[in-house]
Amino acid sequence: MTESRLETDRNRGAPDSHAVAARLAALSHPARIEILKHLSASDSCCCREVVDHLDLAQSTVSQHLKVLVEAGLVRFAPDRQRSRYEVDRDALAGVSASLNALVNSCCADNKS
C-alpha cells in the first residue's frame, strides 16, 4: 500500500522525499529562519540589509542565503553591484503542504 501511495504522489506531481528533505534541511538553522522572516517583511533585500538586521557577519549571512537559494526557498537576482533576495512564497507554501500531508498521512492510520 505504501508503494502505491508513493506512486500516486509522483503521478500528481507532488515533490519527492529528497526535495522536501532538502528544503527542510535548509530550514533547520535558526539564522535561516530569521532571514526568511526578515525577507518576507519586504519585497526584496540585499545581503547588507539582512546583515544589519541580524547582527551577523556578512560572510555568515551570505552562506545562509546561499543555502536558502540552493534549496529553492529564496530567489536571487543581481541588481547592479548588489544582489537582491526575496522569499519564494510558493516554494515555502509547498514545504508547508508537504509537511501537512506527511503529518496527516502518518496520523490517519492511527485514527480508529
Image: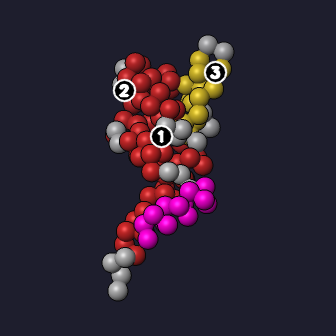
Circle nearer the N terminus (1, 3): 1
Q: Report the span colored magenta.
A: 1-13
Circle nearer the N terminus (2, 1): 1
Disc 2 residue type? Asp
Residue at 61% across, 60% down:
12
Residue at 50% across, 51% down:
16
On the picture, is 36 further left or further right than 13? left
Local SS, label 1: helix
Disc 1 residue type? Leu
- Please tell me in which quadrant of the rendered image residue 32 appears: top left
Label ID, residue 36:
1
Color encoding of the figure? secondary structure
Residue linked to disc 3: 78
Local SS, label 3: strand
Residue at 55% across, 25% down:
46
Classify mark 1: residues with Cα within 10 Å, few (<14), some (14-19) or many (20+). many
Label 2 to label 3: alpha-carbon separation: 23 Å
